[in-house]
Amino acid sequence: MSLRTLHPAARRRVLATTPNAHPHDIVLRPIDGGGAEAMIVSAGEEDFVGAILADVQRPDRAAALAARRGLRRGAGGTLALHQPINRRFHLVLLEAVCRDPGYPRVDPKKLEGMGFVLRRQTAGREGWTKRGKAIVGWRTILAEDADPDPARRLAVGSGQAGAIGAMIAARRGDADQAEDILPLFFAPPPVCAAAGKTLLYGVIPVTSADRSPGAPDDYARISAEDDAEIRKHFSEYLRPRPPLSMPRAGDLLSPAWKPLDIAPDAVGEDGQLRSFALFLQQLKVEIGVGGASDAAAVLMDRLATLRLPMERIAGRAPIETIDARSFVTAAIAILIDGAANNQGLTMPFAWPRIDDDLGGDLTDLAMASIAQRFAAIMPDTPKYDGDDRIYAVRGFVRVKGPPGCASKLVWSDYAEPFRILPWWDGDGPATKISLPDVTNFRSLKPNVSFVLPGPLANLLQGDMSKLKDGDGSTDGPAIAWLCSFSLPIITLCAFIVLNIFLSLFNIVFGWLAFIKICIPIPRSK
């Protein structure tokens, strides 16, 4: 019985369990049949594509292209790619050949589509995916040989593994997600003719403005060592410990105490007061008490189970107590925010013992609160969110089938894995910025304007010498100001200040010989 005579549903079931057929007679591979390290070439020329394609046509092609590979390697020999800001560009370079003796070139008319994917290496491989125009972000690729386009991602021709991957994707809601497909281009016909090859190339994108919704999962995959260090960083008021006498017990809390200004090496009552203030600051800034964190709210509920004695009579139980949640909430406003103590709050005489169960709960909730705080501060994750991430690219072509048959997908192997260098770690050509000559200052007209709100303008127009002592004032007219400056003069002032601070920091770091290079040049004629 022919497959064509079967009901469509039955035909799909049969094809889904059919072993993969050999993908036609075409191979997609690095030029001249090189290995994974031969697939990526780099260039620093302005016309980097033209420069690389010119090398392809040279008689000494192998040597010319070899000089463009592996230009920068990091720890363990991992390939490192520069960002465009460093005037370095990177191409994936492939050839399509027939699986015949001698591997003759493929007729481009046999190909109806092509592209490549950039995948991130973790425990598996992840692709950058979208649902329609909405970015989903990095998702594990369940079937690496399946078509990255969901419209073509049918079980037909993909074998049992592809069918299983499709079912898993449908179960977890990924079936309609499209992996980002990057374009491959045919080299111009004269280039292919001169090289005697059907060449395909694509620019590897190492920067992106894309962001996926949600913060990075740094806390979800935190190491045991980092987890222990952060828990150790928490205040002693959030960890198991014996009862503790409080500093300045019975005194009215006052913003004039300025406990955070106490020297870090202070001992005795001052040292205790500073330690308590750091606890309050940690609750407010790091843990996010008073914000939208659910974990922080639960943490404060746990603190409410502690009762702090507000009066002390020798040999008797305290007559008056306050729960720790109410006390620290008010204390944050007074000692950290500098609010007036209008309610007459006094310092309790002691902080009760925190047993292992309560201490464990408080540190667990503090960790959960910091994770939520982190997610609130960093709501979106950049596509390339880490300097140590490892990526790999892989090309594909769609080969036309016989009349009435679907095209077949042919993948290349993965290229050599690489990481993307941060923007500041580049060895490309320097950018030149010309500064004005002092004799031309009078001719430099204001060409950039700043709008200053009234209070800021009043502060800057006051006695600048008082600002260093914190005595500046924003009092004055409420009108706004428009101030214009010469951008070259701003640049020159910044350059002068930069040199002053570089010289000062050089005393500590001794870095001037590495970060500043000045050489004499002839004057322009």
Image (spheres, rainbow, N blue to C red):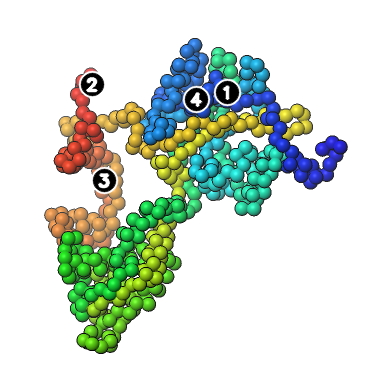
Residue 72: x, y in percent? Answer: 39, 29
Mark closer to the chain start, 1 or 2: 1
* Left or right placement of residue 305 versus residue 185 in this view: left
Earlier residue among tags 3 and 2: 3
Q: Amino acid at mark 2?
A: Ser
The residue to which callout 3 is attached is: 484
Label 3: few (<14), some (14–19) or many (≥20) C-alpha neighbours in 10 Å: few
Q: Residue furthest top?
A: 59
Residue 278, placed above or below residue 525: below
Q: In terms of sequence position, does the residue under pointer 4 or pointer 1 come before the other?
A: 4
**Given this view, does label 1 or label 2 mark the residue nearer the observer?**
1
> If the image is split into quadrants, where does the C terminus sit?
top left
Specify which label sits upstream in the sequence, 3 or 4.
4
Q: Which residue is mark 1?
A: 95
Q: Secondary structure at mark 2?
A: loop
Q: Position of residue 203 (x, y in %)?
A: 49, 30
Of residues 384 and 299, the one drawn nearer to the viewer in this rendering: 299
Three-letter amino acid code at the position of disc 1: Glu
Q: Secondary structure at mark 3?
A: strand
Query: Which residue occupies 18% across, 39% down?
Result: 506
Where in the figure is residue 107, as x and y percent of width and height? Answer: 65, 20
Q: Give the number of the disc on residue 3.
A: none
Q: CA distance from mark 1 to mark 2?
A: 48 Å
Q: Residues within 10 Å of mark 2 (few under 14, many from 20)?
A: few
The reply to whether discs 3 and 2 touch (Cβ–Cβ < 8 Å) is no
Q: Are marks 3 and 1 in contact (CB under 8 Å)?
A: no
The residue beneath circle 2 is 524
Q: Is residue 461 left or right of residue 80?
A: left
Q: Nearer the viewer, mark 4 or mark 1?
A: 4
* Front in this rendered view, residue 460 or 393: 393
